[in-house]
Amino acid sequence: MAKNSLSKVRVAIVEDDESARRSLARLLRAAGMQPTTYASAEDFRADLPQPWFACLLLDVQLLGMSGLDLQRQLAAEGVATPVFFITAHDDPRAREEAMAGGCAGFFRKTDAGSALLDAIRRVV
């Protein structure tokens, strides 16, 4: 998929670490996408009316509501937006729960950004 064809791809980033949030946003912008960042799941939920996103990039461990909790809540509401998880702590139980919940991908924060971009391109 060409960079120009990604220019309308809006991606929500829910990450409580400011440095990681900025880094992910830069990565997506460099690939031609339009990231919108949130410091918490609660901030994401409070952004009403909720913008339309092609996919969500959620940190597993957030202050307050976790990324996994947010995924469950959205699924219960019938939201079918693809979800990707990122984590600094690759806990096998969290990975299993995310995958069982239908996530589109699960990445460690140390994984190459190109792997995340490739996964996003596959679902959008």
Image (cartoon, rainbow, N blue to C red):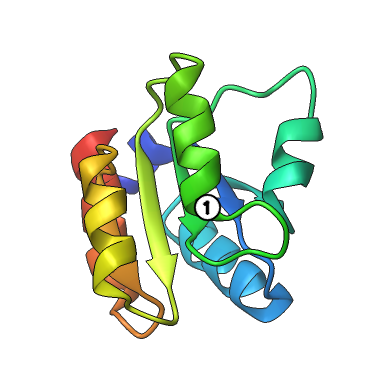
Q: Is residue 9 visible?
A: no
| Image quarter of the C terminus | top left
Q: Position of residue 71 (x, y in %)?
A: 46, 39
| Image quarter of the N terminus | top left
Q: Position of residue 48 (x, y in %)?
A: 79, 22
Horizontal side of 84 relative to 77 (left or right) equals: left
Q: Image height check: is 3 above or below 82?
A: below
- The amino acid type of the residue labelled 1 equals Gly
Q: How many marks?
A: 1
**Nearer to me, 47 or 117:** 47
Query: Residue, x 29% and y 39% (percent of image)?
Result: 101
Query: Residue, x 24% and y 36% (percent of image)?
Result: 123
**Nearer to me, 67 or 52:** 67
**Nearer to me, 50 or 64:** 64
Horizontal side of 102 relative to 81 (left or right) equals: left
When asked about the image quadrant of residue 16, the answer is bottom right
Horizontal side of 113 relative to 44 (left or right) equals: left
Q: Image height check: is 13 above or below 108?
A: above
Q: Residues within 10 Å of mark 1 (few under 14, many from 20)?
A: many
Q: Which residue is mark 1?
A: 67
Q: Which SS class for mark 1?
A: helix
Query: Residue, x 53% and y 45% (percent of image)?
Result: 69
Q: Position of residue 111 (x, y in %)?
A: 29, 80
Q: Image height check: is 44 above or below 32?
A: above
Q: Position of residue 61 (x, y in %)?
A: 55, 67
